[in-house]
Amino acid sequence: DGQTECQLCELGTYQPSTKQTVCLPCEPGTFASNPGLVECTSCPFRLNSTSGSSTCSICGNGFYLSDPQVEKVDIFNKPDEYCVFCPSNAECLYNTTLETLNISPGYWRDSVETATVYRCDNKACEGSSVEKISKGKYCTENHTGPLCQVCVESSSFFSSVSGKCKDCPPLWRLIIPASIVLALILVVIGIHIASKWSNGYSHFLKEASNRVSNFSLQAKVKILVSFYQIINTFDDVYGATIDKKLQSWLNILTIFNFGLLEIGSVPEKCIGSMKSRLLFGSLWPFFLTFVGFLIYAIYMFQNRPETSNTKMHVMKFTLFRVLTIATLLLYLVLPSVLKSIFAALKCRSFDSDSQPSSYLVADWSIRCDSSESNYKELIRIFWAMFTLWMILVPTFFFFILMLIKPSVQSQKITPLAQACSFLWRDYKKETMYWEVFEVGRKMFLTGLVMFIDTEEGSNKILRLVLGIIFSSFYFALLSHVRPYKRRDDQNLAMISNILLLCTYALGILVQQCSSGNETCQNIVGLSLDSYKVSVLAVVLIFSMLVIFLIVLCVLGLTYTPVPTIKVITTGQAPILDLPGHCNHHAFLSHIWSTGQDKMHALARKLQLYLPGIKIWLDVVNLERMEDLENSIKDSAVVVIFYTKGYFRSKNCRREVYTAVNEDKPVILLYEGNSDVIDELKQECVKYCIENDT
């Protein structure tokens, strides 16, 4: 080419042979930083280069450039600082930068400016490729947002079961659970009508009611429901997620949550915005109670006699029935409502560019940022609903129990006490407030514990540890106080708490083993994996149901009908109300010489057939003869058992005079025919004289 002398090869080229007319470019992975080299130098560890490079300014395979704005010379001089190891679950070919990380399918990152990669437990995260990197897309079609769990279509919801977005079911499904509740009200009305018209049906209902009462079924069902309502929060609140292969078993137990959406199989996201969901999930029990009240009130007023006193009686009766339904409903739905309320607090953080981004788990499209107007409004609604359910509802239960405490303690059961018997009937008089403690326990374990590390608490074991500690203290209190009337209820409650403690302990293993089999084996020290630990947890959880059924079977096999006295018009045992000024239901009056044995036998029969009746009997209650008149005044009814010589007794006459003067209802008992009545009259005329003292 007209050259008269050899020229040095330029930077980035080399020539190992002499008398060559051209220089060769350095191969990829090598560089020539000086002219005239006969061989290119290999790039240092972490670095790579393109063909014909004079320096190594790109990162090699398995590394990525953390700062694309850095100067080439700085990359070469400080490769350890700028060329970072490729994160797991990502692929880093040579010349990869932070923005061009190739994310593996099944994983996701918050932005192209973060190297933190998160596993997607669904089918929507398809990772990234060179073609998609420029668009910042990591999700399949119609999916976006954190972990690809936000559906682009507003009429879709993300299904954790299928792992992708699905079309929302029709909202008319909500009519199903609402109809069930209203149907139950209609069934109650139907039973009320049928029991009036059919003696056989009435007898069947009485017998069934008697068996339920003898089994103390209400207490046992409450213990069972409380256990499973707490268990149903283990995934959302405590992060103890059962293996997917066994998840369908636990889905059966969600029926114990008594959630309107769960029963109707309508996903919360299909209700509307997060604000709408929060309000709906918190207020539907009150709306349903109001509708039930209207239906029941309409029925009662259409079947009442046309008198003013009856109108008032019907109104009071309806209000007491509605109070019974409201108390039961508030108790049953409390955990599911708390789940809806605390969904406004549960956030999750993801590493982003300059600072972590936090999103609301219940609605990934909302950022947990106090500067966001949507989130600020949710927090305001949260505190309003928190006050309603976490403060006012327990206070309502406590206030009701305070009002009826004198009635329950003195066994003067008022209509209000009867309407709220769900709260106190199963407990001793001394521990009638125990239901408030039980409600507080459920609120703490299913709701309040979520205040502990609202973002990462479900991924740590602290909540599970606190659950163990709290349940241990509750078990100690339960064992010491022994609040239940029946021993079998007390034993079942203690077994339930022991199983709950064991489940919390096993929940720690479930949580740790879900991170990987290696982690599980390192912690436990046995050849366990997520599936095996989940099997143990499911067996433990369902053992409570098995024990419950065994208890019922044993009670059924050993059941012996107990004779009872019932009111003909209602078919129920009489409510043993006492007037406010009385402390005894009945004063038994008789003459010792001829009526003592039979009257004492009558007293024992009454106490057997009417548990809780308070009888005044001389051999038990009389301390001084001077107190006879006061004892009559202290009794609601006077029962006179006439035998020969009754009116000859001065003390018997004192009892009769006081009963008449105090206008007490008098029940006369005697043995024989009408001749006994004639004898009684003659004896009364003879001894009950005007000046008798």
Image: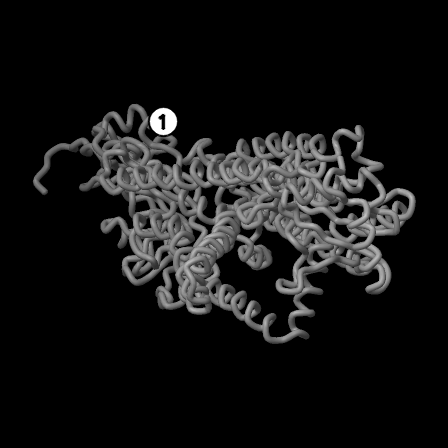
Does residue 445 appear in this view?
no
Residue sitting at 66 percent across and 63 percent down?
571
Amino acid beneath label 1: Asp
Q: Position of residue 680 (x, y in %)?
A: 81, 54
Name the residue carrying label 1: 80
Seen from the viewer's position, the closer of residues 139 and 18 is 139
Residue drawn at (82%, 54%) of the image: 682
Residue 184: x %, y % from top left: 51, 65
* Residue under the point 60% across and 50% down: 225
> Is 224 placed left or right of 275 in the picture?
right
* Label 1: how many Cα within 10 Å (few below 14, some 14–19, many 20+): few
Q: Is residue 619 left or right of residue 273?
A: right
Model colouring? one colour
Image coordinates for residue 27, horizontal then vertical, percent: 30, 41
Quadrant showing the N terminus: top left
167 is higher (above) or lower (below) than 101: below
Residue at image point 34% right, 47% down? 146
Image quarter for residue 517? Answer: top right
Q: In this view, does 6 lie to the left or right of 30?
A: left
Q: Who is closer to the viewer here, 336 or 672?
A: 672
Q: Which residue lies furthest to the left in this view?
A: 2
